[in-house]
Amino acid sequence: MLGNHDAVADIIPVDVPVNLMIAVSWFTAVKNRQKIVVYNCTSGKMKNTLTWGMLETFCRDIFFRNPFEKVFAIPNPYFTTNMFV
């Protein structure tokens, strides 16, 4: 797959944006805001940063420890920055 090992994979657990939506709806109702406010929920480069290289390693390790049975094709869990590979 085309990807950079050092790029941040902006993947967060689903409960984080759901909790944010609940908190924002409560805050909007309590403050009675007239302006439209846009909120953004990302992992970014803060705590517990996950890179595509780390994700590649995790997926590869899990795949080789728990291989699929009777697969038609074996998935390629490797990233490359070369578009021609």
Image (tube, rainbow, N blue to C red):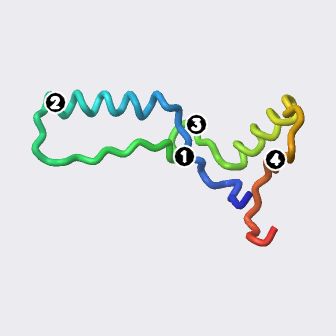
Q: Amino acid at mark 2?
A: Ala
Q: Mark 2 and mark 3: span between their CA atoms?
A: 32 Å
Mark 1 crowd level (few <14, some 14–19, many ≥20, 10 Å Cα): some
Which residue in the structure is indicated by mark 3? Answer: 48
The reply to whether the C-beta atoms of the residues labelled 2 and 1 are less than 8 Å apart is no
Dot 4 or dot 2: first in sequence order is 2
Q: Mark 4 and mark 3: span between their CA atoms?
A: 27 Å
Q: Amino acid at mark 3?
A: Asn
Q: Mark 4 and mark 2: span between their CA atoms?
A: 47 Å
Horizontal relation, residue 57 to residue 25: left or right = right
The reply to whether the C-beta atoms of the residues labelled 2 and 3 are less than 8 Å apart is no
Dot 2 or dot 3: first in sequence order is 2
The residue that appears at 59% across and 50% down in the rendered structure is 8
- Nearest to the eye among marks 4 and 2: give it: 4
Horizontal relation, residue 39 to residue 67: left or right = left
Relative image position of residue 6 (x, y in whole percent): 67, 54
Q: Mark 2 and mark 1: span between their CA atoms?
A: 29 Å
Which residue in the structure is indicated by mark 1? Answer: 10
Relative image position of residue 10 (x, y in whole percent): 54, 46
Mark 2 crowd level (few <14, some 14–19, many ≥20, 10 Å Cα): few
Dot 3 or dot 1: first in sequence order is 1
Dot 1 or dot 4: first in sequence order is 1
Q: Which mark is residue 75?
A: 4
- Nearest to the eye among marks 2 and 1: give it: 2
Dot 2 or dot 1: first in sequence order is 1
